[in-house]
Amino acid sequence: MKSFRRHSATVNAGSMADIAFLLLIFFLVTTTISADKGILRQLPPVCDTPDCTADIPERNLLRVSMNEKQQIMIEDNIVELVEIKTLVEAFIDNNGIDKCDYCEGEQISESSDHPKDAVISLSHDALTKYDLFVSVQDEITKAYYDLRTRYAKQAFNKTPDQLTKDDLKAVKKAYPFIVSEIMVKRSN
């Protein structure tokens, strides 16, 4: 009798490794990795002169605050998110001293003297939700953008995307973005 030896079947794993490597590359190339998004702001330059800490006249300061109940207040009056842009525009563009030839404000005595003097003070409680804080910042930014767009059309007869670098500097100088951000810390 002959004895039969059985050889175990072998599988060539070389091609399996190639396929696995190709699948890995495919998934790496086609998968999108979400990036953290932040708020695009340029920090102000360091101020070495004493006028940076000078007192701001009350009429040139607009206080926007958010509390732990997620309420938005402008000068201690509760407002809705959709009202912020209009109120900020009216404050910045007030022309209280009547020396702004491009302002269209109502010259209210309790509002800012000039767009270059207007300061928005944005404060929030430690328990304010991040989404609300960003939404309020967006509304303030929209107000400045609309005022700058109007100025660009008046002064240069251009839309913001058509402005040259020098034109853009002039627009930003006419309506400087001056926002002070403060977090109110809770005491235990």
Image: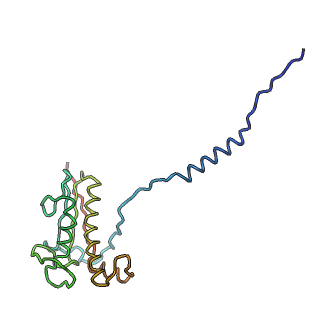
Farthest top residue in view: 1
Q: Is residue 155 above or below residue 87?
A: below
Q: Nearer the viewer, residue 71 or 29?
A: 29
In the image: residue 102, left or right of residue 32: left
Q: Position of residue 118 (x, y in %)?
A: 20, 74
Q: Is residue 4 above or below residue 156?
A: above
Residue at x 19% of width, y 50% of height: 69
Residue at x 48% of width, y 53% of height: 33
In the image: residue 15, left or right of residue 44: right
Q: How many marks?
A: 0
Q: Nearer the viewer, residue 152 or 131?
A: 152
Q: Position of residue 8 (x, y in %)?
A: 77, 27
Q: Nearer the viewer, residue 128 or 32?
A: 32
Q: Nearer the viewer, residue 179 or 171?
A: 171
Farthest left residue in view: 109
In the image: residue 44, left or right of residue 94: right
